[in-house]
């Protein structure tokens, strides 16, 4: 199965709790309110891409990565269609293995698939030097994924995030999937 990858770990959870206490404004609240930052979707190097329409500081909340929640098994079935179209909109929540464990990252929960029901955040393309990042939050007990800037971004720049190693390992046979 292939998909965009979001790592959650105990370190991440501690960071998240600390962020929650600082709340300026709290990103859970931004998700609940449905806040979003405007950006433009237009043709880029890898099909549609998302581009900043104004300068944004680091940690700007861009919006929620919305989609259908799928089980890993459902996502596996769906992945054949997405692979055929060479467009994969599945966002998996992964858990990091315990320190010292030989186990690889494993699927931890539902997969957010924006292929059929999504919003413009599904247009963010991949870069190994990203200017945006995903964050997972439990909002009223529901797993949700938001996108925020990880550095200051200038108007006109493409918004990019790192899809993660597994995505590219699983797509390695596709000649069009060239990791930049
Ligand atoms: C979440 S979608 C991003 C939006 C997509 N470009 C579109 O036109 O809808 C992910 C897909 O974009 C393409 N893509 C994104 N970043 C890429 C990159 N760095 N290199 C090659 N293809 C990329 C791949 O086809 C991938 O399956």
Image (cartoon, rainbow, N blue to C red):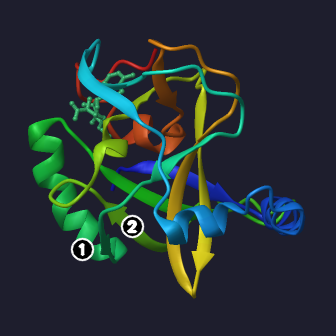
Inter-mark Cα distance, 2 to 1: 9 Å
Residue at position x 26%, y 44% in the image: 88
The local crowd at label 2, few if under 14, some if 14 to 19, many if 20 or more residues have their Cα within 10 Å, is many
| Residue 108 visible, this angle | no
- The residue that label 1 is drawn on is 74
Q: Quadrant of residue 99?
A: bottom right
Instruction: Judge by depth and name the residue closer to the eye, 34 or 77.
Output: 34
Q: Is residue 92 left or right of residue 74?
A: right
Q: Sequence-wise, which precedes: disc 2 or disc 1?
A: 1
Residue at position x 51%, y 60% in the image: 145
Q: Quadrant of residue 71?
A: bottom left
| Residue 103 visible, this angle | yes
Where residue 126 appears, as percent x and y from the top left, is 44, 28
Report if the beta carbon of the residue with label 2 is closer than 8 angstroms to ligand 1: no
Quadrant into which the N terminus falls: bottom left
Mark 1: secondary structure: helix
- The residue that label 2 is drawn on is 111
Mark 2: secondary structure: strand
Q: Is residue 104 above or below residue 120?
A: below
Residue at position x 43%, y 20% in the image: 179
Q: Quadrant of residue 86?
A: top left
């Amino acid at each position: 199965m292939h998909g965009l990858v979001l790592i959650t770990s105990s370190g991440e959870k501690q960071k998240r709790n600390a962020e929650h206490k600082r709340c300026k404004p709290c990103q859970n609240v931004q998700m609940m309110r449905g806040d979003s930052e405007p950006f433009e979707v237009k043709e880029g190097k890898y099909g549609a891409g998302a581009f900043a329409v104004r300068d944004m500081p680091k940690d700007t909340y861009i919006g929620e990565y919305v989609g259908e929640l799928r089980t890993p098994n459902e996502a596996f079935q769906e992945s054949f269609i997405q692979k055929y179209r060479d467009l994969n909109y599945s966002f998996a929540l992964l858990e990091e293995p315990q320190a010292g464990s030989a186990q690889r990252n494993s699927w931890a929960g539902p997969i957010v698939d924006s292929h059929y029901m999504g919003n413009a955040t599904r247009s963010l393309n991949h870069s190994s030097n990203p200017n945006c990042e995903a964050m997972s939050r439990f909002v009223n007990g529901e797993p949700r994924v938001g996108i925020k800037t990880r550095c200051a971004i200038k108007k006109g720049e493409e918004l990019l995030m790192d899809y993660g190693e597994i995505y590219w390992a699983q797509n390695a046979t596709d000649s069009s999937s060239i990791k930049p």
